[in-house]
Amino acid sequence: MQRIYILVLTKIYNMTRKINKRLKYVMLGICVFCFVMNCILYTAWHTFGLTIGYAELLVTNSLFLILIIVFSVDDMIKPVEWNKTIFIPWILCFILIIISGIHHDIPQAFLFSSFINLMIFPCLYFVWADRKDVETLYIIVCKATLLAFFIYFTYNLILSPLAEDTAYYGIAINPNSNGFIGLAGIISALYLICAERAKWYYILLSGMSMALIYVSLSRASVIAAVLVLLTFIICYYRSKIERKMSFLKTTLVIFSVIAVIFVSLGAYRCFLINITPEINSYITSEMILEVYAEDQDWEDENVLLEKFNKGDDFNELTSGRYQIWKAYVEKLNLLGNERGKMGLYIDSLGRNASSHNNYIEIAYRSGIPAGLLYAFVAVYAAIYAFRFMFSKTRFDYKLSFMPMAVVAFGVLSNLERAMYPLEKVHIFMFFIALIPMFVCNKEKHIAE
């Protein structure tokens, strides 16, 4: 694979070597911003009268991903040593998924995305491993994400009111989408506070991100965001030695972040309910899904808290996910199953449903071996992130993006569909967080 990458990337570099390095960074940032905004707008296509489908999203974001690789190449490419512990399971997993498409029909998006994961993402990893400054990519991605998030947040704030006792749709087709967008925002803001300085606008954006998650009533996103915040606190305390900051100053920064978050939670909800004018053509209350409909007997003003407390058993608490997981697991086999666009039909629910779990979903579609390999990659990433956070060696705070993205993905991949890195920003963040793990490099910027 590296021979192919070197051959292609050398030709690319010969064409782009005369481009000013600063201009390359600008073009790289523009491509990342377009990628992120494309993911966000896909959830709001109906509001703007757009007819962008899933196929168009995957194709356009694939092109943006290729351009990101093109503008990432800043020198002649040299071979690197892959970390076989994660590289081999990764390659085998997506080869098995593609082969399963020969045995039985699998959705084209799933097949296309598996090819991107098999060939294109390792190319991105190869380029940035060779550059040895992956923190540069992390900073560019986070800044582009925050810009896109701010535009989306502000548009919702001005034009999309919130019905008082419902989840917040805004201009998105699903309230959970707002939770995912907010999650990408808070990862970006907290990482930039770690990697650069605790600038006031990063702190403010962290509060805005958490506020969007809160009004979306997405429990998975709330859990992920709280764990990301905890990861940030650990990383920021660990970074104080390299930053030459006192314990008091470090604590003040963390306290400021938490204070802004709590103020933002109530302020954003209050603004959307009482101030945002109902002048837009899309009113939240007209598009409520059945799960948030008026026949839901919410007894408390804190709807999110009631969602966490509802139900007397695990199945109710997980909104039927346990029931769905059980039905999927009963159908698992070595070669995979036909799935269709709507997911498995659940007799007890009387409808089709996605598995709401990456590992079960892949095992169901492409066989148990593929699901186990995908799970191995995720577990390896979790262990790697944990060792990075708590190792006794010098702490490289500029890589703190990695454990934040891994923690967020760990939650969402077990509770939601979080398979396609070209579809949602927080999934893309997990995929680029893997870069330090894919190479055997003892240099200071790679955690051992």
Image (cartoon, grey):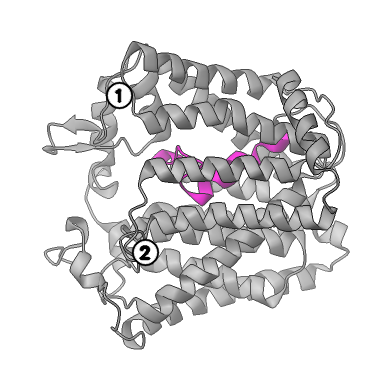
Q: In which quarter of the image is the N terminus?
A: top right
Q: Position of residue 62 (x, y in %)?
A: 54, 40
- Distance, label 2 to label 1, CA atoms, is 30 Å
Task: Establish if 370 lies above or below 318.
Answer: above
Q: Is 358 left, or right, of 316 in this rendering?
A: right
Residue type at the position of mark 1: Val
Residues in magenta?
Answer: 413-436
Residue at left 25%, top 33%?
343
Residue at label 1?
329
Query: Which quarter of the picture shows residue 258?
Result: bottom right
Query: Which quarter of the picture shows residue 352?
Result: top left
Residue type at the position of mark 2: Ser
The reply to whether the magenta stretch includes residue 51 is: no
Number of callouts: 2
Q: Which of marks 2 and 1 is nearer the N terminus?
A: 2
Q: Is 107 left, or right, of 226 in this rendering?
A: left
Marks 2/1 in contact by CB < 8 Å: the verdict is: no
Residue at left 52%, top 49%?
426
- The one nearer the camera, 269 or 139, is 139
Is the residue marked by circle 1 packed among few (<14), some (14-19), or many (20+) residues within 10 Å?
some
Residue at left 39%, top 15%?
100
Q: Where is residue 150 in the image (x, y as percent from the top left)?
A: 54, 70
Task: Establish if 197 lies above or below 74.
Answer: below
Residue at label 2?
216
Give the SS element for disc 1.
helix
Q: Position of residue 284 (x, y in %)?
A: 26, 71
